[in-house]
Image (cartoon, rainbow, N blue to C red):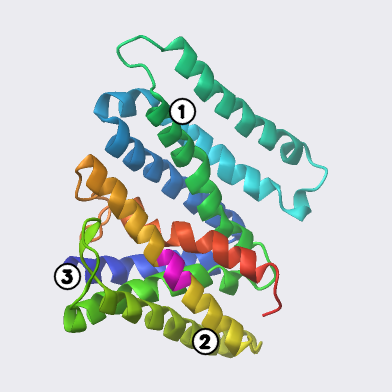
Amino acid sequence: MLQRILVAVVGIPFLLAVLVVAPEWATMALLCGLCVIGAHELISAVCGGKKTRRWWGLAAMLSVFTVVCVWFADGRFAGTAMQSVSPFLVTALVVLVFIVMITEHGRAEELSFRDICTILVAGVVIPLALSCLLRLRLMPHGSGLVLIPLVAAFSSDSLALFAGMALGRHKLASLVSPKKTVEGSIGGLVGGMAGMVIFRIIFFLCTEIPLNIIWCVVLGLVGAAMGQMGDLVFSAIKREFGIKDYGKLLPGHGGVLDRFDSVIFAAPVLWLIISHVSL
């Protein structure tokens, strides 16, 4: 627990500095780094050490180009060469993955269909999901909006932990995550909503813009629910492949996928809601 707190004390200010204070390109750079590390963690967990050493670079390169493609898709780059070229680069790398599958078939380190799916999830799906944070950052008042998935997911994680420890009696999904309880899950939903109410107050103090309180509560609820789903999904993967954590980058938290599993699921859904409603 002490390690978790110390990492949070250091990590949260750093995250805020990059997402809120630093220029928008810093958010893109941070996401590229997280996706590269996350790709290594997922491929290592599913495919094993030898295939990771050989093919992680391909997945890492694909993940970076995916994030960069989202960056250049912003309207400010309309008509530029990179906006036109970046989708083709991503497509070419996806095609290359399948070419490798064909050329390596029958060899000792061939890529199975499971390996291909893992590389594509690590190189495309997860980066696209996390890039929704970048999409939020590029919106008006994006330095505040980008925090919404993080607030909803992390508030839910925190209160779910304490509610589960204090009140947990009924198992939520014992085969996937034995320590998670229904009471903890409910506490997490409350935590997500409470976190967004607090966020609304701070956002108003900083911008003098009153966000719709109902939508804030909805975003907190949805973000918490999706965050819990992400946590369980990535826990199921760990159970299937017999690992405790995806990595050791963050002491007390595990790897990137251990810490951001909830954000991977929450960010796309919350970006979709925010981009279609008036807050």
Say which label, 1 or 3, has the lower sequence index. 3
Say which label, 1 or 2, has the lower sequence index. 1
Does residue 246 appear in the picture of this structure?
A: no
Q: Which residue is mark 3?
A: 1
Q: Choose between 83 and 125: the one closer to the eye.
A: 125
Is disc 3 placed on a helix, strand or loop? loop
Mark 1–mark 2 distance (CA, rounded to whole Å): 42 Å
Q: Is residue 265 left or right of residue 65?
A: left
Is disc 1 placed on a helix, strand or loop? helix
Q: Which residue is mark 2?
A: 202
Residue at x 30%, y 12% (from the top left corner) = 108
Residue type marked 2 = Ile
Highlighted magenta segment, given as a residue range:
223-227
Q: Which residue is mark 1?
A: 58
Tell me the crowding category of disc 3: few under 14, some 14 to 19, or many 20 or more residues within 10 angstroms, Cα based: few
Is disc 2 placed on a helix, strand or loop? helix
